[in-house]
Amino acid sequence: MIKGNLPSRQRVREILITLTIDISAGIIVFLLTQDLKISLIVIIVMIFVISGVWRLNDHINIVKKSGLKQIFMDSPDPTPLLKQYYRTSQRIRLLAIRGARMLGSDRSLINHIVRELPRAWKGTIQILLLKPDSEYLKQRAVELDHNPDQFAAECWSAINNINDLRRKFDLNIEVRLYDRKPIIRCTIFDDRALLSYYIGEYGHIPYQYEIRDGEVSLMRMINLIYDDIWDTSQSVLEDTNKGGLHAKT
């Protein structure tokens, strides 16, 4: 039957069900055809078919336990989906390099999302961006054939945009800067996450995975990674004397 470390009771149950179906099918075919050879062939074929069904069911259960819900092919407009998830979540955590598309300016996705949040929404938003003067950010810019200074400017632009949103909408948003090689890009909600990752040294994989929380879900790993980066990152503070922002040392 199915290979693997299935619980003994479950394997016994599968064997008994398989034998019952096989014997029943064999008896029915024999009664209809009176041909023992055909009945034996039917039983053998049924064994292979049912074994395949058990294996398929096992794979489906593994996917369910992992939390994988669906895969997006780089959705051209994720705004409606994100609006729904923001509206129904109380804690949102973002991890990116510079957040150009999501956070970069007053026309970014987060601005459209925040404007339509219910006034009663009192959730918290945590944002992790790569430190603008980090060597990893410069490396990333070179990999994508961009100007490192422009990359750093886009990172600060995102930070300033977030700061404007905090003041304008009285949101509980905290931004921190990390300084390590970026591996994943994600948005984590209460019970789900949208995840993509950087592949090799060039680009990021275009697929975005939606993962739901669960007992053995990948969500736990993602949250652990986020916690580790958050705990070792620098807070971004507003410097009222200089009229700008800086990273807390």
Image: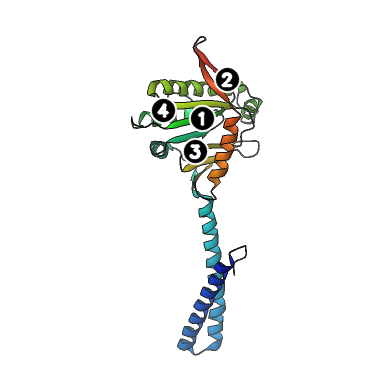
Left or right of residue 101: residue 230: right
Pick whichever, 222 or 27, lies toward us: 222
Query: Which circle, 4 or 3, is nearer the viewer?
Result: 3
Say what amino acid the circle numbered 3 marks: Ile
Callout 4 environment at 10 Å: few (<14), some (14 to 19), or many (20+)?
some
Q: Amino acid at mark 2?
A: Lys
Q: Which comes sooner in the sequence, label 1 or label 4?
A: 4
Residue 206, can we see it? Answer: no
Q: Which residue ends up furthest to the bottom in the rendered image? A: 34
Its colouring scheme is rainbow
Q: Which residue is mark 4?
A: 111
Residue under circle 1?
A: 127
Front of the two marks 2 and 1 = 2
Q: Earlier in the sequence, mark 2 or mark 3?
A: 3
Pointer 3 local density, CA inside 10 Å: few below 14, some 14–19, many at least 20: many
Q: In which image quadrant can residue 165 be found?
A: top left
Residue 50 screen position, x and y as percent? 53, 71
Q: In this figure, which residue is indicated by the disc labeled 3? A: 188
Secondary structure, mark 2, is loop
Looking at the rendered image, the quarter that the N terminus falls into is bottom right
Location of residue 130 (image quadrant): top right
